[in-house]
Amino acid sequence: MSPLIAIAITTGILSAVWGWIAVAFGLISWVGFLGCTSYFASSGGYKALLQTIFCNTSGMLWALLLIHGGDLWGAGVAGYVMTGVVATLMCVQAKQQWLGYIPGTFAGCCATFGAAGEWRLILPSLIIGALFGYLMKASGLWLSHKTQKADAAPTVIDPA
C-alpha cells in the first residue's frame, strides 16, 4: 500500500478517536486538529514533534500576553503596535533551534485567540493533537511498510 493511502487510513481512524477523546474530556477538538496539522506540516519525526509542541505552546503564551496585556495598553493604536511587536518576536525566537518552527508558533497563537484564551483547554488540546499527528503519520508509514513487505513476499504456488 502506498504511504499516502496508508497515512490517509490511519489519519481517518485516529481523527475519529481524537474527536471522541476531545468530547469525552471536554477538550477543544479543532484546537487539537491545529496541533495535528502543525505536526503534519513539519519535517516529521520525534524531534519535529517536540519542536511542534514547543512552538505551539510558545504561540499560546504570546497570544496570552497580547490578550492580558491589552488591559495595560488598551485596544487602540497601542494594541496594533503590540501585535506587530509580538509577531516580530514570534519570528525572532526561531533563532533558537527548539523554537525554530514559525508556523507552529503562529498556529498556537491563532488557536489561543480563537478559543478566547482558555489556556487550560488549549494547551492539552494542542499537545494531544500534535501527538495524534505523530501517531497518524508513524502508524501510516508502518502500515505502508508492512503491506509493501507482504506484497513483495514470494507467492508459493501449489503444483498439484
Image (spheres, rainbow, N blue to C red):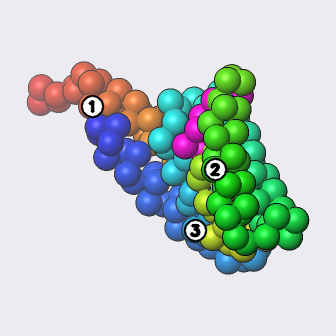
Residue at 87% x, 65% y: name it.
72
Task: Select label 3 or label 1 by which is in front.
Answer: 3
In the figure, 150 relative to 11: above or below? above
Assess disc 3: are there few (<14), some (14-19) or many (≥20) residues with their C-alpha within 10 Å of its C-alpha: some
What numbered label is drawn on residue 151?
1
- For the residues labelled 2 and 3, the Cα–Cα distance comes to 26 Å
Q: Is residue 42 visible?
A: yes
- For the residues labelled 1 and 2, the Cα–Cα distance comes to 54 Å
Q: Which residue is more in the foreground, 53 or 93?
A: 93
Q: Is residue 56 visible?
A: no
Residues in magenta, as a range: 98-104
Tag 1 secondary structure: helix
Which quadrant would the N terminus be assigned to in this image?
A: top left
Task: Select label 2 or label 3 by which is in front.
Answer: 2
What numbered label is drawn on residue 136?
none
If you read the primary sequence from the N terminus, does the residue marked by circle 2 or circle 3 appear first? 3
From the top left corner, tell me how far across and down residue 44 is, in percent. Answer: 53, 32
Q: Are marks 1 and 2 in contact (CB under 8 Å)?
A: no
If you read the primary sequence from the N terminus, does the residue marked by circle 3 or circle 1 appear first? 3
What residue does disc 2 label? 84
Q: Which residue is farthest right?
A: 72
Type of amino acid at the residue the image marks with label 1:
Asp
In the figure, 110 relative to 1: above or below? below
Q: Which residue is farthest front?
A: 77
What residue does disc 3 label? 30
Residue at 63% x, 70% y: name it.
114
Residue 16 lies in the magenta stretch: no
Residue at 81% x, 56% y: name it.
65
Query: Quadrant of residue 90 in the image?
Result: top right
Magenta stretch, overall SS = helix
- For the residues labelled 3 and 1, the Cα–Cα distance comes to 37 Å
From the top left corner, tell me how far across and down residue 16 is, in percent. Answer: 52, 67
